[in-house]
Amino acid sequence: MIIAILIKLDSPGPIIFSHERVGKGGKKFKCYKFRTMYVDNEKILEEHFKKHPEDREYFLKTGKIPGRDPRITRLGRFLRKFSLDELPQIINVLKGDMSLVGPRALIEDEVKQCQDYYMEWAKYIKPGITGLAQVMGRANISHIDKNILSIWYMKNWSLWLDVIIIFKTIKVVLKTEGAY
């Protein structure tokens, strides 16, 4: 509740941001997060590229802006740093769309880029709020590497592996390693 009030005080717009992800068996679902960007973030992005055209190519490759991303609110930086923006995904867990630990929940474009062997495994396992990719690099590793780690996780799943990932998640979040 405190985060919701702070989001409203920080910038106008909805508290919760939802985006479509692909889950177990290719089923699409709305993945919830606290909003960390300004509502007019696309306009802000284009204005940034006019001032810094050299950032466009980097953004197209990584989905990130070098340095401080002007689309992210002040509170949004804090929420992302400690992964608090992910808390609403507990709703996805309660609805049965996600689990606490699992492979990354992909967007449709990522699914199209994935190899068949990734999707072969992904149809049996729910995506997780956290997972091997998140504890092995968060935003510091490429989407391809994240998918490789997700495949390894799916092939080698065990309850013990999930316990290890949960403890590593706590460590990574508290150290704010790889936050974006």
Image (spheres, rainbow, N blue to C red):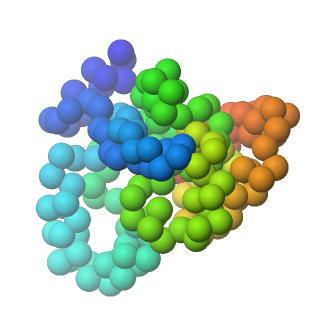
The quarter of the rendered structure image containing the N terminus is top left
Can you tell which quarter of the image residue 107 is in?
A: bottom left
From where the camera sits, is residue 104 visible? yes
> How many numbered circles are shown?
0
Q: Vertical placement of 47 versus 167: above or below?
A: below
Q: Position of residue 16 (x, y in %)?
A: 29, 32
- Looking at the picture, tell me which residue is in the foreground, 167 or 29: 29
Percent of width and height locating residue 57: 36, 82
Residue at 32% from the left image edge and 84% from the top image edge: 54
126 on left or right of 70: right
Left or right: residue 94 compared with residue 39:
right
The answer to whether any part of residue 164 appears in the image is no
| Residue name at image x 27 percent, y 55 percent | 71
Residue 22: image x %, image y %? 45, 49
Task: From the top left corner, tell me how far across and down residue 171 is, in percent.
Answer: 71, 38
Q: Residue furthest top?
A: 1
> Which residue appears at 26% of the width and 82% of the height?
53
| Of 115 and 94, the residue lying toward us | 115
In the image, farthest residue toward the right: 160
Q: Nearer the viewer, residue 149 or 167?
A: 149
Residue 63 located left or right of residue 163: left
Q: Which residue is painted at 45% across and 24% down in the image? A: 95
Foreground residue among 63 and 112 = 112
Q: Is residue 109 above or below residue 79?
A: below
